[in-house]
Amino acid sequence: MKKVKVGIVGGSGYTGIELLRLLAQHPHAEIVTITGRKDAGTHVAKMFPSLRGRVDLVFEDPASAPLDQCDVVFFATPHGVAMSMAEELTSKGIKVIDLAADFRLKDKEVFKKWYKMGHKCPEILAKAVYGQPESMRDEMKNADVLGMAGCYPTTIELGLMPLLKLHKEVGDIVNLDVSIIADSKSGISGAGRKADISLNCAEFSDNFKAYGVAGHRHEPEMVQQLSLFAGETVPLTFIPHLLPNIRGIFSTIYVRLKERGMGIDYQALYEKAYAEEPFVDVLPEGSQPETRMVRGSNMVRIALYRKEPDLLVILVVEDNLVKGSAGQAVQAMNLVMGLPETEGLEQIALVP
Amino acid sequence: MKKVKVGIVGGSGYTGIELLRLLAQHPHAEIVTITGRKDAGTHVAKMFPSLRGRVDLVFEDPASAPLDQCDVVFFATPHGVAMSMAEELTSKGIKVIDLAADFRLKDKEVFKKWYKMGHKCPEILAKAVYGQPESMRDEMKNADVLGMAGCYPTTIELGLMPLLKLHKEVGDIVNLDVSIIADSKSGISGAGRKADISLNCAEFSDNFKAYGVAGHRHEPEMVQQLSLFAGETVPLTFIPHLLPNIRGIFSTIYVRLKERGMGIDYQALYEKAYAEEPFVDVLPEGSQPETRMVRGSNMVRIALYRKEPDLLVILVVEDNLVKGSAGQAVQAMNLVMGLPETEGLEQIALVP
Amino acid sequence: MKKVKVGIVGGSGYTGIELLRLLAQHPHAEIVTITGRKDAGTHVAKMFPSLRGRVDLVFEDPASAPLDQCDVVFFATPHGVAMSMAEELTSKGIKVIDLAADFRLKDKEVFKKWYKMGHKCPEILAKAVYGQPESMRDEMKNADVLGMAGCYPTTIELGLMPLLKLHKEVGDIVNLDVSIIADSKSGISGAGRKADISLNCAEFSDNFKAYGVAGHRHEPEMVQQLSLFAGETVPLTFIPHLLPNIRGIFSTIYVRLKERGMGIDYQALYEKAYAEEPFVDVLPEGSQPETRMVRGSNMVRIALYRKEPDLLVILVVEDNLVKGSAGQAVQAMNLVMGLPETEGLEQIALVP
Amino acid sequence: MKKVKVGIVGGSGYTGIELLRLLAQHPHAEIVTITGRKDAGTHVAKMFPSLRGRVDLVFEDPASAPLDQCDVVFFATPHGVAMSMAEELTSKGIKVIDLAADFRLKDKEVFKKWYKMGHKCPEILAKAVYGQPESMRDEMKNADVLGMAGCYPTTIELGLMPLLKLHKEVGDIVNLDVSIIADSKSGISGAGRKADISLNCAEFSDNFKAYGVAGHRHEPEMVQQLSLFAGETVPLTFIPHLLPNIRGIFSTIYVRLKERGMGIDYQALYEKAYAEEPFVDVLPEGSQPETRMVRGSNMVRIALYRKEPDLLVILVVEDNLVKGSAGQAVQAMNLVMGLPETEGLEQIALVP
């Protein structure tokens, strides 16, 4: 099988190094170029010695990098970059997979409100597909541009999809007069590879805090997808917190049920819904997920509890850098390039 | 001022060593005896070298320890122990301060249900006072037996007290048709000083998990107190999680408001309610508490958010071993012995 | 290629789960059976949920497990077990790879002194080969029984091999009148998967301590191998410490040089010595290794410093559970079964 | 007793907040002013919420801060600041206590070599005293300017003082033909409160590395003091490492003994030498120190081992921010102001 030629724009952050880790072990990918404006000329393995002997590339200036020789270009950049290059790349038949937010939100006004900039290529946005394979697989296969789901959204969307789809199908399952509450906790790598005093290890190890309580940019994306599942607007309260872990997201989701919803066997519903999914695992009844169950792997694991007749509690874990970011992006690449979906993504979680 | 003579029963756990740390620095306390059945004969400072030069005691057998020379006896034991010794001690005029659950629940049937044993001294239970100074100060001053509040309950009760008292006073503030949700996260010391494979550092560092999702023994205690505040039964959903921190509890509390409740300025309500409390700090609007803000100190810090018109989110942090246990117990001792309430409890949090 | 049939004796510890992680991803291995006396009947994936969907085995009683259907049997047991089963297995042509200490020490008196038990199969011990591929590759290929190198020894032996071999070859390089000092620091998983109060996360996170200062069982093994390299007895002072990390060993080695030894270019010597080794990386001059550079991978990375004319400082990192244990054992299996040595061992370190 | 009026220059780093924590609890200190150029106008408790209710000060511009109303001024600044202000302050009779390196090194050429700047007040330097109470108590009492010992040096100097003084007194104890080796490990707070990518929690938690292997600025200070103890030049090899802990230094020191030195009972020597020291604890024979034994306290704890006849291994722990910095500076203030030396420094280590 011919190898997929891959480019990475903005490779010096955590999603960048995670893409490198996964793609360097992928049997059918060849990394052609990786860019890093500030780091142009630096050996990748000098910055990331864990890649010594495995990645023999130099960060290139994005202006001169041979992106046009690629089949797929990943953007592991802040928002605003992918949208400025997507048109040129897609015009050459190159697939664009953006790990940031440029192509997640269908409504460009919502984008503007949360990201404080106008969208630069609304026509491409209109055709772009939200990159979350378990919910958008068919649409993704033929897309030219993918706006990959965020890390928190992946846990919350997969945690709610079977329930909300049932709600859409039969009606009157979930009480949407009150918001669904998602209390999420993320490892510190989710904050990015940056010099920031609040991320200093002396500040953050042995600590735990909430952040973005007043509003977090992942909210509109989640409302968009959850509403799509439910067939009506889903009100969501999302409170993110930071864990002194390197990797891992744990979302505890609280859903109020309507009377009809109280009679459902959710364990069975979820097991059936995800039976064929290689990367979603519904744990046996009574299980309590832990973030380390997925550390370094592309898995999402889900447990379900009925604390009260009208309350379903859904616990979801993922590795924010794999299924929450780079791993899901490689899964997307496999889909758009016609490779087996699990290829290069079979790492088992690192325990202990 | 004469020193208070203190005994500690069961001093080899984390609440025990924390009592020792606080009492050894207390200007008006003298530790007369400390017991440890298994460790009888062992020097306290041999087991806990951090106390070398500061605590010159040997663990004594509870049967022969001179507890009757004490003014106050703390029980830092598992439940079931304090209730077997309370009658004898109180008959001699000795105050009993139990850090476990023997005297928390007023209803002995509820105790039996959750703790799987009958109560051994229901008459004493009837007179015992729940040990949570900010809510029960006056009752505590004259009590002979105190059942100290649990670690999680302290955060959730203090987080909700002003709101529920207002609800009781004026009515129709909180929507109690749906449960209040408390999503709590605790440092690992809350699980106790024990050899347990799931607490092994290789299992638990860089990890995060829920536990006790199906039911946790702190629930009935919280419902009892919250209902007392509200003047009616308060339904509560409590989901505890374990953090890879040594110390610290962070509770994120979600309360649905009724229409009348939507018009209240909660920031002002809480600031006023706790204005005179030395150990409860209402943070300025927009603050995001962190567990390290209280590490090693007896403080509780609270922040309030209105995410939606009908939803109040309350964030509370404490050190589970200080305000959540040993510190609050020393505060109780100060109260019952007529000492200034803050004595021996003025340690500032250890940051970083 | 036919798959190698593998058995694992004693699979419920950290070396056991790490063998499972590696072998489940190995393209030419098939795990036939895994034993666990206490856990017989338990699903492996129930104990280790990270293996759900990847390992579909039940722990079997060692007495009834079909070990005789295997080509290779790994012992991930405490010392004393492999030696009691090696004779029977080897008599059936089955290769034995012991991750514990039964076959590391050539002198059975030394074994007895350090392990407080007589050796049960001295004839097999006489033929057994020390399992450290970079130093013993040829001998290992034809061995029936391998006593795999310990975690600390692998770092210290690989850190010293080129130097000591030069000393043997040309003489008068290292001053062996004084001991070589190895100051080693290990992640907590090196202490094993056990319930032990000193390993409790509240005891050990945010902590650092020495242990085994008076004597550690890895000493005789290291002296044996280092002396083999040097052609004379090598005195060694070994001080191990415990890090609050899950994985990773960092050894800082101090070697006094003789006058002739002061003139050598050690950077060049080591680069040449390890040029063809897939799992040993000599870092560029001036590098400072970090344990995370090898987390989850089978790599050893080495840096060299000359602090003073007569002092060579060698810094070595490895993942104690991979190159220090299960990974090196799989490398050994590849060797004895004629597979490519790197097969199943190409995981890149997990960073961050 | 009248309170000592205290000023702090440069209060926004970790030594600054630790001075605030200790001084706010000190019974005879009053913090008059704290400066912070960049943070002038900011409430101290806004930057450090752990001090809410305890420190009611605003960072002042150093140019306008009322330092001349102080009895003592602490410098918690980078090197170069104290030397530019010391002359003016001392001319007004104000004591200067510098926590940085401006007054540690007696030889201004050595200072220039390691700190890349000329010394600005060599006359004051000539009269300044090295601030390490256990070794310089008498000199410190009458000093106007103190150059406080560094964090690593405090462990290594106290670890070696009794031995080297004996060497000076009777001769031929330590073999100084080879360097003393100090393998030190420090918690991350030692690197300072700064935004630096290598200190990001995702980079540094669950990691361990050496740094400054080629040379660290604390070396000349240690050689100066050790040589003073020994009465001759002491060669030292110092290799620092970074631990993923917030606080704590652990130094493992290796000393080669001469024949006469092999006959000494070092346990007795050290116990006698430190018998009257409130902040130095010689642990019983066979003890293994842990950093948490001193977390948050001003104690140093020491253990001694004879691994071989000619080798003494000395293990020392301290909290780098207390005895290694702010605590020792408060101890110095007590000395120069005639207060009891332990005042305000009796915090017991926080365990767990």
Image: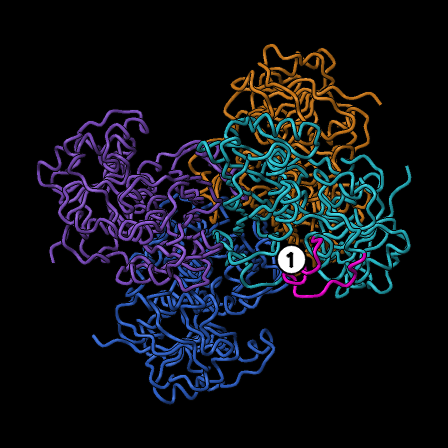
Chain colours: A blue, B orange, C purple, D cyan
Question: In the visual, does C55 lie left or right of C252?
Answer: left
Residue C203 falls within the magenta-colored stretch: no
Q: Nearer the viewer, residue D104 or A10?
A: D104
| Residue where numbered disc 1 is placed | D193
Where are the magenta residues, as a range?
A: D105-123
Residue at screen point 69% across, 42% down:
B158
Q: Does any portion of residue D351 appear in the rendered image?
A: no
> Of residues C34 and A315, which is closer to you in this image?
C34
**In the rendered structure, the residue with mark 1 lies on which chain?**
D
Helix or strand or loop: what does disc 1 sit on? loop
Task: Please identify the quarter of the rendering in which residue B97 is found.
Answer: top right
Instruction: Specify whether D155 is left or right of A282.
Output: right
Q: How many marks?
A: 1
Report the front residue among D277 and A191: D277
- Image spot of residue D49 (x, y percent): 72, 52
Is C167 on the left-hand or right-hand side of A178? left
Which amino acid type corresponds to the residue marked 1 in the rendered image? Answer: Arg
Residue toward you, D128 or D164: D164
Residue B219 percent coordinates (x, y) = 57, 37
The answer to whether residue D119 is magenta is: yes
Q: Measuring 35% from the left and 37% from the top, which residue is drawn there?
A: C219
